[in-house]
Each structure stands twice: as C-alpha cells, then as structure tokens.
Image (tube, rainbow, N blue to C red):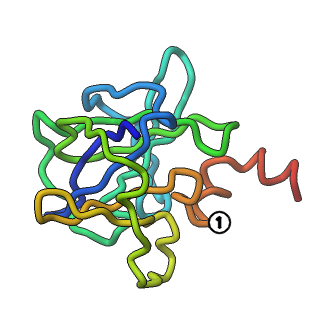
C-alpha cells in the first residue's frame, strides 16, 4: 500500500493515499470561535468551505509551531464529505505491505482512528483510519446537515 506519513508529536503515522484528494501547503484558515477542540478552521477549497481538523489536538498533543512541512491533507471522509487534516512533518510517502501492520493490542478511548502498527527501521508507524477520525460530537459539529438527515 502507498501511504503518506506525518508526525503527531514525536511519533510517526500514515494515511492510505487512496483516501487522499490532495495535499496542500498550510494556508490561512478561517477561525471558528467557540468551536470544539481539534477544529482548526475552514479552508476555501476551490470555492467550497472545507472543515479542517488539527490531528495533534485530536490526540491531545500540544500544538507545535507551523513549519515548512506542515500541510493540510484533504481527504474523502466516509465517502460523502471532504475534510482537511492539519498535520506536521508531512514529508514522504512510504510503500508498506498491508501484512506488515498488526494490531497494537491496546484499546485507546476516544481514539478509534488509531489503527494497526508496523515496525519499520526499528520504529513503530501507526495507521490512521480516516473514516473513524471524528468523534460523534465533532462530526455533528462539522457536518450537521448530514446528521439531521440521518436522524
């Protein structure tokens, strides 16, 4: 599988590139005062307002300085929404056999998006499950019309 890698704190994570629409440089986001923790703001993506989440904040890590390698990864979320993910040290793609990923054996509350791990070059890399990235609370905040239509 072809994966895009990035950091959350000092740890390395990957996203399957099949979920990625585009990777953009960090641009100025429209801040949303009073929004839920983890929501970085709105991105104007080809005329469409796209919510952007800060993946470090979702993992309860302190916000790091924006650098030249901070990017917004635009992904397809649950096959019906476009979502931006602000991530740090987005620098490379990796090709890793899907069989290299194994269950971590640890269940982490509210972080269902943290998937299987693989050991590459004596370092663990963890797969992010895009479709499980948002909690119900964040999903209802970012996509309220979709929630109302279902409920």
Instruction: Label 1, secondary structure: give it.
Output: helix
64 to the left or right of 114: left
Position in image of residue 83 (x %, y %): 52, 39
Position in image of residue 23 (x %, y %): 34, 28
Q: Is residue 138 above or below residue 79?
A: below
111 to the left or right of 66: right
Residue labelled with disc 1: 136
Q: Quadrant of residue 74?
A: top left
Residue in the foreground of this view, choosing between 114 and 28: 114
Q: Is residue 141 above or below residue 31?
A: below
Count of number-bearing discs: 1
Q: What residue is drawn where x is 33% and y is 63%?
A: 57
Position in image of residue 90 (x %, y %): 22, 40
* Quarter that holds the N terminus: top left
Q: Residues within 10 Å of mark 1 (few under 14, many from 20)?
A: few
Q: Is residue 4 above or below residue 124?
A: above
Q: What residue is drawn where x is 12% and y is 57%?
A: 121
Residue in the foreground of this view, choosing between 108 and 147: 108
Q: What residue is drawn where x is 11% and y is 33%?
A: 68
Position in image of residue 142 (x %, y %): 60, 49
Q: Is residue 64 above or below residue 24?
A: below
* Quarter that holds the C terminus: bottom right
Q: Residue furthest top?
A: 46
Residue in the foreground of this view, choosing between 103 and 65: 103
Q: What residue is drawn where x is 33% and y is 62%?
A: 126
97 to the left or right of 19: left
122 to the left or right of 7: left
């Amino acid at each position: 599988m072809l994966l895009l890698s990035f950091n959350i704190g000092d740890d390395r994570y990957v996203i399957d590139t099949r979920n990625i629409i585009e990777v953009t440089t960090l641009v100025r986001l429209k801040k949303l005062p009073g929004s839920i923790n983890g929501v970085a703001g709105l991105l104007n993506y080809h005329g469409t307002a796209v919510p952007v989440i800060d993946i470090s904040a979702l993992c309860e890590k302190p916000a790091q300085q924006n650098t030249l390698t901070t990017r917004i990864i635009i992904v397809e979320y649950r096959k019906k929404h476009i979502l931006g993910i602000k991530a740090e040290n987005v620098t490379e793609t990796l090709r890793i056999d899907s069989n290299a990923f194994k269950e971590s054996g640890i269940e982490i509350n509210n972080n269902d998006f943290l998937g299987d791990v693989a050991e590459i070059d004596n370092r663990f890399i963890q797969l992010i499950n895009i479709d499980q990235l948002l909690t119900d609370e964040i999903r209802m905040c970012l996509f309220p019309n979709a929630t109302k239509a279902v409920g």
